[in-house]
């Protein structure tokens, strides 16, 4: 139990560092920015109390906000993503449901399930994030494509990273 | 009462979500300038320290480029030295004008944090109010303008980058002096837009755009960029796309400019307004 907790704390720290040091520096034509740190919310176990899920998502967003100097932008997006997670999980639930002891990973539910689950949540997160950042509907389609393309890149990086982190 | 409790228990997830989300949005929208400044000061101090470390490593990796740029700048400055001009008459010596007081002071600072991929980009510099930096000072790089200081803490300064939708500077076409406001349109880190140039002005792609010096923040004649293309908007005015000469993706060292006359100009111009 303690070991799991430490494990997730470690993940939290590593993902924030990776976001700040690596992924913030990726911007293809100033347009597409991946925000890979949301992987933390994706990988939290199914049985986690909802309260803990929301609070940890908030802390995750807030820490990224602090370093980017954009208070509230990432935290709102992350909290919304955490709020949507149980519903998205129910939407893509396998026929027999999620059994205890399983984790939201490729090795348990297969690639197709993981891609659908990741894409859905990342899209939600990125759309809220990019629209909150500009806070205007002036360049609606420019923002729309930024959010869409960034979500695709983030999802791609997340899915590929799974094969490196959890090898069979 | 019991119904209320039951309601809370039943919808605790939704209620908690709304609470935390409202708090996040409150953070986002909080317009209270005092808290905002405090928050930025704290977070700048922490993230500034961290960014300094990261930047130290990056600096080391880009030494070669930085050396080249410094060498070029040295060459330019050497060219301005008295010793690089032939003396016309044996009895005439160039002297600085001692009657003219200093108008601009340049302070060197290092960029410790910088973004180019947002709609409202800011830079963080490693010098703050203790080094004499104040809001509203101009910031230039060795290749062109960079931005305007927005807020300062003791050791760090936050700079409104030219790549910010709130940034606006008065620019002119170097060869004929026509001027207009220059803004960033939020699309690409390489281009900005200059408007309000009347249609009878002759312009060509490649023409140099410099600061006009109006508004008093930027000294006159600093490089902004070159015209990349232009079109008539509404028949009367040109909308000019300007290729920025500063490469915001690899800014390292910048100069902060203090204008000694800014307060005087400001109060004079304010007196004109009714």
Image (spheres, helix red, strand yellow):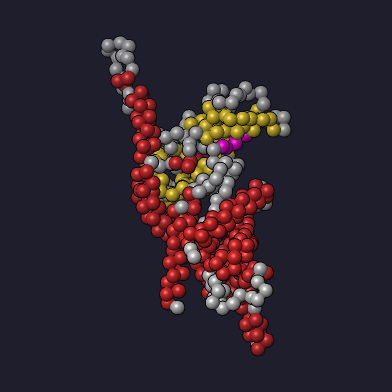
- Residue span colored magenta: B191-195
From the image, which quarter does the N terminus of chain B lie in? bottom right
Q: Residue at x 57, y 33 (%)?
A: B242
Residue situated furthest left in the rendering: B91
Instruction: Relative to A33, say whether B96 is above or below.
Output: above
The answer to which quarter of the image holds residue B79 is top left
Of residues B234 and A95, the one drawn nearer to the viewer in this rendering: A95
Dominant secondary structure (helix, strand or loop) of the stretch shown in magenta: strand
Looking at the image, the residue that sits furthest to the front is A168
Query: Would you identify the image quadrant in which residue B199 lies?
Result: top right
The residue positioned 65% from the left and 85% from the top of the image is B6
Q: Residue at x 37, y 33 (%)?
A: B68
User: Which residue is at 36% across, 48% downward?
Assistant: B57
Up-down relation of residue B30 to residue B108 (above or below):
below
Can residue A117 be seen in the rendering of this structure? no
State the image coordinates of residue B50 (x, y, percent, origin top left): 39, 55
Front-lying residue, B118 or B137 = B118
Position of residue B216 relative to residue B99, above or below, is below
| Nearer to the camera, B21 or B149 | B21
Percent position of residue B8, x then y: 63, 81
x and y, in percent, of residue A59 in the image: 50, 67
- Quick check: A25 left or right of B103? right
């Amino acid at each position: 139990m303690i070991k799991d907790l430490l494990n997730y704390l470690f993940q939290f720290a590593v993902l924030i560092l990776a976001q700040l040091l690596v992924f913030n520096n990726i911007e293809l034509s100033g347009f597409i920015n991946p925000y890979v740190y949301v992987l933390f919310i994706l990988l939290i176990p199914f049985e986690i109390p909802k309260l803990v899920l929301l609070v940890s998502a908030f802390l995750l967003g807030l820490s990224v906000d602090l370093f980017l100097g954009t208070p509230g932008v990432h935290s709102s997006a992350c909290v919304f993503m955490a709020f949507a997670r149980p519903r998205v999980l129910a939407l893509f639930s396998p026929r027999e449901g999620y059994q205890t002891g399983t984790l939201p990973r490729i090795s348990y539910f297969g690639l197709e399930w993981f891609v659908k689950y990741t894409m859905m949540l990342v899209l939600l997160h990125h759309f809220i994030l990019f629209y909150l950042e500009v806070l205007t509907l002036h360049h609606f389609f420019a923002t729309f494509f930024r959010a869409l393309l960034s979500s695709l890149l983030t999802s791609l990086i997340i899915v590929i990273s799974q094969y490196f982190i959890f090898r069979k | 009462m019991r119904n209320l409790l039951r309601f809370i228990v039943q919808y605790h997830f939704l209620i908690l979500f709304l609470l935390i989300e409202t708090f996040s949005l409150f953070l986002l929208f909080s317009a209270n300038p005092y808290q905002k400044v405090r928050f930025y000061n704290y977070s700048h101090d922490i993230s500034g320290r961290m960014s300094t470390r990261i930047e130290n490593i990056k600096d080391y990796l880009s030494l070669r480029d930085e050396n080249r740029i410094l060498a070029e700048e040295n060459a330019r400055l050497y060219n301005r030295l008295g010793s690089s001009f032939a003396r016309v008459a044996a009895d005439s010596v160039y002297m600085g004008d001692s009657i003219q007081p200093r108008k601009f002071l340049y302070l060197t600072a290092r960029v410790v944090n910088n973004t180019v991929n947002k709609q409202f980009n800011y830079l963080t510099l490693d010098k703050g109010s203790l080094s004499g930096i104040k809001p509203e000072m101009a910031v230039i790089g060795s290749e062109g303008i960079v931005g305007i200081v927005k807020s300062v803490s003791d050791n760090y300064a936050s700079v409104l980058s030219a790549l910010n939708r709130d940034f606006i500077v008065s620019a002119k076409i170097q060869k004929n002096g026509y001027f207009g406001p220059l803004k960033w349109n939020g699309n690409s880190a390489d281009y900005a837009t200059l408007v309000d140039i009347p249609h009878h002005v002759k312009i060509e792609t490649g023409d140099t755009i410099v600061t006009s010096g109006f508004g008093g923040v930027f000294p006159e004649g600093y490089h902004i960029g070159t015209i990349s293309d232009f079109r008539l908007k509404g028949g009367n005015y040109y909308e000019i796309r300007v290729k920025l000469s500063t490469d915001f993706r690899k800014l390292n060292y910048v100069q902060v400019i203090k204008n000694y006359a800014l307060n005087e100009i400001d109060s004079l111009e304010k007196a004109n307004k009714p």
